[in-house]
């Protein structure tokens, strides 16, 4: 669930978005969460955008707690020392992924210490509170280094190569896809668009919009069922899929 598509950084690996910038208001989030709950106990608060920028993050987490939804957040890390201090010990938040490669991807290595100190303070608080688990990501490696290490209980350090979004990927493949979209997750963009996966950053493969139809109806629609069958049969459901290599990364990271 994308609670905002607005970000405070300009990372080289980010495809940006041509969609209208927005925050999902608390009432809309609550309605969406209500519709999502029958299908899952776990949500991730991002597709594009920096979730810790949301002005009512506390309210959003409270809705998740009330509805029994576990929350995972991926952040560029810049706000962990401020808004992020809500997360340690919060009953709804189980995992935080920190994209430590963001600073380098903004060409801002001169300020690395002022970036990393609040991240360290956040880690210390999370450790003291006993939650959430934290994954520190360095997805800026060269070569084929792909490795996840346990730094300490509840803290992972993950190395990987830079991630290329399908909208930015050069070349395409006609090989059968191995896709997790619709099979184990889907995306809801900030404007209510329902997309089959977390890689559809522009809503190109949108299956419907929650402002027009409930989630259950979108998932039960003929075109969604066909997309699901195609994905199960390893067929692309749109040109975007022919540029997508996420399954290879995901396969490597488990
Ligand atoms: S193959 Fe298509 S549906 Fe699957 S993750 Fe990639 S872009 Fe999304």
Image (spheres, rainbow, N blue to C red):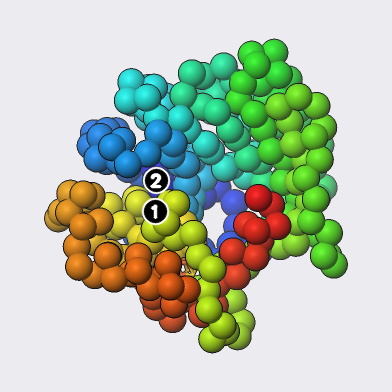
The image shows residue 186 at horizontal and vertical percentages of 39, 54
Q: Quadrant of residue 143?
A: bottom right
Q: Is residue 118 visible?
A: no
- In depth, the one of 62 and 195 nearer the eye is 195
Looking at the rendered structure, the secondary structure element under dot 1 is: strand
Tell me if the residue at label 1 has its CB under 8 Å from ligand 1.
Answer: no
* Sequence order check, earlier mark of 1 and 2: 2
Q: Residues within 10 Å of mark 2 (few under 14, many from 20)?
A: many
Q: Is residue 148 left or right of residue 254?
A: right
- In depth, the one of 61 and 156 nearer the eye is 156
- In depth, the one of 115 and 245 nearer the eye is 245
The image shows residue 151 at horizontal and vertical percentages of 82, 32
The image shows residue 44 at horizontal and vertical percentages of 47, 42
Residue at image location 27% in from the left, 65% down from the top = 225
Residue at image location 81% in from the left, 40% down from the top = 149
Determine which of the numbered discs, if any, sits on residue 101 in the image: none
Q: Residue furthest top?
A: 128
* Tag 1 and tag 2, C-beta contact below 8 Å: yes
Spatial separation of the CA atoms under disc 1 and disc 2: 6 Å
* Image height of 245 relative to 146, above or below: below
Q: Which residue is mark 1?
A: 187
Q: Which residue is mark 2?
A: 1
Residue at image location 35% in from the left, 60% down from the top = 195
Q: Residues within 10 Å of mark 1 (few under 14, many from 20)?
A: many
**Dividing the image into 4 quarters, which one contains the N terminus?**
top left
Residue at image location 80% in from the left, 34% down from the top = 150
Looking at the rendered structure, the secondary structure element under dot 2 is: loop
């Amino acid at each position: 669930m994308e609670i905002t598509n607005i970000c405070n950084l300009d990372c080289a690996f980010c495809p940006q978005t041509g969609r209208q910038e927005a925050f999902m208001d608390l009432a809309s989030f609550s309605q969406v969460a209500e519709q999502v709950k029958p299908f899952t106990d776990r949500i991730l608060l991002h597709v594009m955008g920096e979730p810790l920028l949301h002005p009512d993050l506390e309210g959003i987490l409270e809705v998740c707690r009330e509805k029994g939804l576990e929350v995972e957040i991926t952040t560029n890390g810049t706000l962990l020392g401020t808004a992020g201090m809500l997360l340690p010990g919060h009953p709804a938040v189980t995992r935080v992924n920190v994209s430590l490669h963001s600073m380098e991807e903004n060409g801002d290595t001169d300020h690395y210490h002022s970036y990393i100190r609040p991240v360290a303070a956040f880690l210390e608080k999370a450790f003291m509170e006993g939650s959430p688990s934290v994954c520190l990501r360095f997805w800026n490696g060269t070569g084929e280094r792909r490795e996840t290490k346990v730094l300490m209980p509840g803290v992972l350090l993950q190395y990987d190569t830079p991630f290329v979004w399908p909208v930015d990927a050069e070349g395409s493949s006609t090989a059968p896809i191995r896709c997790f979209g619709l099979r184990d997750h889907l995306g809801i963009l900030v404007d209510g668009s329902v997309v089959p996966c977390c890689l559809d950053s522009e809503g190109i493969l949108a299956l419907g919009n929650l402002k027009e139809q409930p989630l259950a109806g979108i998932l039960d629609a003929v075109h969604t069922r066909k997309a699901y069958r195609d994905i199960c049969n390893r067929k692309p459901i749109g040109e975007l899929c022919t540029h997508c290599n996420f399954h290879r990364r995901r396969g490597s990271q488990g």
